[in-house]
Image (tube, rainbow, N blue to C red):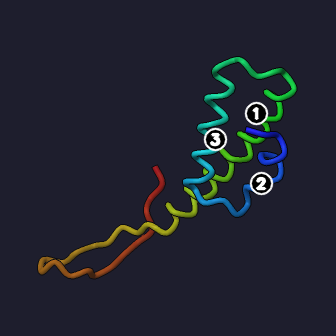
Amino acid sequence: MSDSSNSSVSTDTMSFEDALTKLETIVRNLEQGNVPLEKSIDLYTQGEALRSRCDTLLRAAEEKIETIKIDGKGQAIASSPLAPE
């Protein structure tokens, strides 16, 4: 994992899957404890940006999910936004 490739990639256009994969890699590297302090700080900062991207994409997906009400014949009769937990 090179510094230039990680810092030059914008999280603003990453898919959820790409951001999550990159975040998982960062977490593994940090958990191993073999990363110098300065690199750890850089990785942590990148991880926060990726976590934020994943959170934003998940919230957007939740807003699109609707609860569909079905009548006795199995026909959709109404829908409403998913209620947050």
Amino acid type for the residue under numbered disc 1 = Tyr
**Corner quadrant of residue 14:** bottom right
Q: What's the distance in space between the residues labelled 3 and 1, CA to CA?
A: 10 Å
Residue 16 screen position, x and y as percent: 57, 56
Amino acid type for the residue under numbered disc 2 = Val
Helix, strand or loop at mark 3: helix
Q: Residue at x 63, y 31 (%)?
A: 27
- Residue behind mark 2: 9
Labels 3 & 2 near each other (Cβ < 8 A): no
The image's mark for residue 78 is none
Whichever of callouts 3 and 1 sits on the residue coming sooner in the sequence is: 3
- Residue behind mark 3: 23
Helix, strand or loop at mark 1: helix
Helix, strand or loop at mark 2: loop
Labels 3 & 1 near each other (Cβ < 8 A): no
Q: Which numbered mark, 3 or 2, is in the foreground of this view?
A: 2
Whichever of callouts 2 and 1 sits on the residue coming sooner in the sequence is: 2
Q: What's the distance in space between the residues labelled 2 and 1, CA to CA?
A: 15 Å
- Residue behind mark 1: 44
Q: What's the distance in space between the residues labelled 3 and 2, CA to CA?
A: 13 Å
Left/right placement of residue 73 relative to residue 32 reads left
Left/right placement of residue 70 relative to residue 49 reads left
**Corner quadrant of residue 17:** bottom right
Residue 15 screen position, x and y as percent: 60, 60
Q: Residue at x 72, y 18 (%)?
A: 34
Residue 36 screen position, x and y as percent: 82, 21
Q: Residue at x 12, y 80 (%)?
A: 73
Which of the image's four quarters has the N terminus? top right
